[in-house]
């Protein structure tokens, strides 16, 4: 696929020879007993046989629309059975889903459709707060808009239903299977191509590490489109090991706890704000959540004191996960001593993951010192999709991905995340590119200059503060006005600033860049 950066041949050979890469495809992950329940969504329960058949019929339906191997399809679906069916259908015919988040709006979706030259865009009819995705769909240029629900002038998802055609072209293991979204550090989000074989390894190795099997009942509380919930081990890791996936619309205890009780959920993946909510909720909730064996927490730093509370309060094990859509996953192991589980963000999943911790000049720091984490391996990308200039900066010449995360490594190999070098805000696991938000703010008629920084927050880890320099003879906008402005520009709401500060000028570093650390320090 044009715009995809492959692994060099020597690595390809090695990953195959050493057994990391197989010929297994993402479309073949349904490996449970045909009569075992694979998916619970609302009142709907589907066995492996049901889900397999529905994925095949929907795949044939997409094929009839003219969508097939090598095509891209933007999917923006909440945690519904349709998400799972559409995902499986597309990967079976080798069309790569581009996994947008339900919160994305015109700004993000328009860009994703354009960059990926998507042939289709799949949406629900309505979303949270009654948001009408069909209105959003009218602003994008794609051949087919497919709607789960009332389609209005578009194509109903229910019409994508045909008998499987054995002649249908299947993908190859080295093909791009799915596109994930990067958290982003630049003006525009980046697409992460994940091949069938690297993502299959990602989910299978994760499922093994986490001890998933046919008795696993996994609750999805994060957006299913997020790498953590999808494949670390996530939905796909459950399917590959024959367990049951239960979909929750959100991580709110009101919705999640009754599902845990009813379905006897054993595992869940959460971001820290959700884990904190659960730690509080047990004291007032009546539900029996004693089936829970393991709570995975990741996406943002989970404080050691809070991690230590999980076994006491929720009566289950905790696992820290430090991962990224770009690839590398670090997990604390189920049999790690409690101090490592509480105080570290885990160690790399794969023996073939290569890790370097470097200083500003790119030299390795002394063992145990803090530096930027660089990595390459059998499931870490070698380049963002169609982004040659950005790739020249984000990768070393020998193919290591610069994570932008500051870490230190213990003798055991475990990593502790100490901070971040990249210009990004991590708002409770949601990633916000400062530059992207600044560019939107700069379009406001009263804003002369903007600098976005994270501010510490006890629940979210960080929230977003926008420092503004106001144009002479204009009135500074209020926070509400700025949010309304961003909404009209079609920006996802999680990127809206939580606070505004107006200043006369920005402090500068010796090389003339905005001194964001000084701005952030001025808040406390
Ligand atoms: C996950 O993936 P992304 O792509 O949304 O974000 C990746 C970034 C990392 O580079 C790091 O800055 C931060 O999120 N992060 C953590 C963390 N887990 C992720 N920072 C501190 N502690 C952690 N435990 O966030 C993601 C992907 C797969 C599994 C889990 C999380």
Image (cartoon, rainbow, N blue to C red):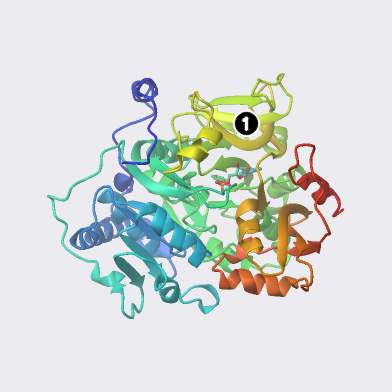
Label 1 secondary element = strand
Residue where numbered disc 1 is placed: 373
Q: Residue furthest front?
A: 473
Q: Is residue 283 toward the left or the right of residue 35 in the image?
A: right
Q: Position of residue 175 (x, y in %)?
A: 31, 40
Quarter occupied by residue 157: bottom left
Tell me which residue sits at (39%, 29%) in the image.
7
Q: Is residue 506 left or right of residue 435?
A: right
Q: Position of residue 371 (x, y in %)?
A: 69, 29
Q: Quadrant of residue 336?
A: top right
> Ligand 1, what quadrant?
top right
Q: Is residue 60 left or right of residue 23?
A: left
Q: Position of residue 26 (x, y in %)?
A: 33, 45
Q: Nearer the viewer, residue 99 or 5?
A: 5
Q: Quadrant of the N terminus?
A: top left
Foreground: 297 or 140?
140
Q: Residue at x 29, y 66 (%)?
A: 144
Query: Mark 1 Cα within 10 Å, few/some/many (few <14, many 20+)?
Result: many
Looking at the image, can residue 89 be seen? yes
In depth, the one of 22 and 337 nearer the eye is: 22
């Amino acid at each position: 696929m044009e715009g995809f950066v492959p692994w060099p041949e020597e690595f390809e050979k090695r990953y195959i020879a050493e057994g990391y890469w197989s010929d297994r495809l993402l479309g073949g992950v349904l490996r449970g007993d045909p009569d075992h329940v694979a998916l619970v969504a609302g009142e709907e329960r589907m066995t492996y046989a049901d889900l397999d058949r529905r994925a095949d019929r929907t795949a044939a339906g997409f094929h009839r629309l003219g969508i097939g191997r090598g095509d891209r399809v933007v999917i923006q679906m909440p945690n519904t059975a349709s998400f799972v069916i559409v995902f499986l259908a597309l990967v079976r015919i080798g069309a790569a889903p581009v996994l947008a988040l339900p919160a994305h709006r015109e700004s993000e979706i328009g860009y994703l459709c354009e960059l990926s030259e998507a042939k289709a865009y799949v949406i629900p009819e309505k979303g949270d707060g009654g948001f009408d995705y069909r209105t959003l769909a009218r602003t994008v240029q794609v051949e087919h808009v497919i709607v789960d629900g009332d389609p209005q002038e578009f194509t109903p998802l229910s019409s994508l239903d045909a008998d499987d055609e054995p002649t249908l072209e299947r993908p190859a293991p080295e093909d791009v299977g799915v596109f994930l979204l990067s958290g982003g550090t630049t003006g525009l989000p980046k697409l992460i191509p994940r091949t069938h074989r690297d993502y299959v390894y990602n989910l299978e190795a994760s499922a093994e590490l986490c001890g998933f099997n046919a008795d696993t009942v996994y609750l999805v509380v994060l957006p299913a489109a997020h790498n953590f919930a999808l494949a670390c081990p996530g939905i796909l890791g459950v399917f590959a090991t024959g367990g049951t996936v239960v979909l929750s619309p959100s991580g709110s205890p009101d919705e999640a706890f009754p599902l845990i009780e009813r379905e006897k959920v054993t595992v869940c993946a959460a971001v820290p704000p959700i884990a904190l909510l659960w730690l509080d909720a047990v004291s007032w909730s009546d539900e029996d959540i004693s089936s829970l064996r393991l709570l995975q927490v990741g996406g943002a730093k989970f404080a050691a004191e809070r991690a230590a509370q999980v076994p006491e309060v929720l009566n289950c094990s905790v696992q820290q996960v430090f991962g990224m859509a770009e690839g590398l996953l670090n997990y604390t192991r189920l049999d790690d001593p409690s101090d490592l589980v509480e105080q570290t963000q885990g160690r790399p999943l794969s023996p073939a993951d290569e890790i370097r911790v470097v200083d500003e000049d790119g030299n390795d720091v002394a063992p145990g010192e803090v530096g930027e984490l660089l990595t390459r391996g059998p499931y870490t990308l070698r380049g963002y999709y169609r982004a040659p200039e950005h790739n020249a900066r984000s990768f070393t010449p020998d193919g290591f991905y610069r994570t932008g995360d500051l870490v230190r490594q213990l003798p055991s190999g475990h990593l502790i995340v100490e901070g971040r070098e990249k210009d990004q805000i991590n708002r409770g696991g949601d990633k916000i590119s400062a530059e992207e938000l600044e560019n939107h703010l700069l379009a406001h008629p009263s804003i002369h200059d903007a600098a976005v920084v994270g501010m510490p927050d006890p629940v979210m880890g960080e929230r977003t503060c926008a420092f503004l320099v106001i144009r002479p003879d204009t009135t500074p906008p209020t926070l509400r006005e700025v949010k309304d402005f961003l909404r009209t520009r079609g920006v996802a709401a999680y990127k809206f600033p939580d606070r505004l500060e107006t200043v006369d000028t920005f402090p500068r570093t010796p090389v003339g860049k905005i001194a964001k650390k000084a701005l952030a320090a001025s808040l406390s």
